[in-house]
Amino acid sequence: MAPPLLDEVEDQIRLVIHDLYKIQASAHGFQGPETSRALQDHIKTLTSHLRVLARTASPLPIQIPPEIIAYVDEGRNPDIYTREFVELAQKGNQYLKGKSEAFTSFRNALAREIEGALPELKPDVDRVIQETGGK
């Protein structure tokens, strides 16, 4: 369950979105001075809801990475940034997984060679393999 403050912020965001929709509808159906007052009222309501949203959301500990802000400022889609970030993380994970598997393979090959050359070290080799995640 989300904290009460977060629920309140979500409600305020819904109100702002609803206000924007009303403004869009009023602007689309604008017919001059007779609809001007309604549009002004919708804009005032939006301003009021934005003010309340800013006050309500200010205590939330949300930090947006500066890279995302710069990305949006450049007119780019933050979803693309997220996708690129995830792809980069996956690529890094694959690289590290390959390194880990290579070290595991090397550890096992070295252990076989040491056991073959120095059989008296078998208990120590088995202990090292066990402590490093081997079988």
Image (cartoon, rainbow, N blue to C red):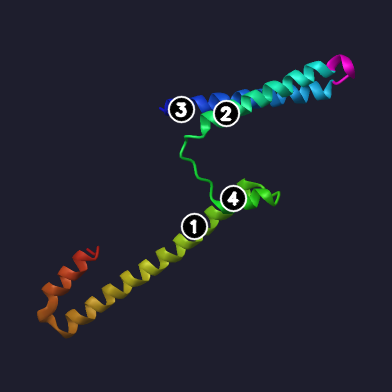
Q: Nearer the viewer, residue 122 or 51?
A: 51
Label 3 or label 1, whichever comes before in sequence order: 3
Identify the element where label 4 is drawn. helix
- The image quarter in which residue 84 lies: bottom right
Label 1 or label 2, whichever comes before in sequence order: 2
- Residue 33 among those drawn in magenta: yes
Whole-percent x, y for residue 105 in the image = 32, 72
Q: Which residues are magenta?
A: 30-35
Q: Are marks 1 and 2 in contact (CB under 8 Å)?
A: no
Q: Amino acid at mark 3?
A: Leu
Residue 53 is labelled as: 2
Q: Which residue is labeled 4 in the image?
A: 68
Label 2 or label 4, whichever comes before in sequence order: 2
Q: Which residue is labeled 1 in the image?
A: 90
Residue 5 is labelled as: 3
- The CA span between labels 2 and 4 is 22 Å
Q: Are marks 2 and 3 in contact (CB under 8 Å)?
A: no
Q: Amino acid at mark 4?
A: Ile
Residue 29 is labelled as: none
The crowd level at tag 3 (other Cα within 10 Å; few <14, some 14-19, many 20+) is few
* Image: 120 above or below 92: below
- The CA span between labels 4 and 1 is 19 Å
- The CA span between labels 3 and 1 is 34 Å
- The CA span between labels 1 and 2 is 36 Å
Quadrant, the C terminus: bottom left
Q: Image point 18% across, 82% down: which residue?
A: 116
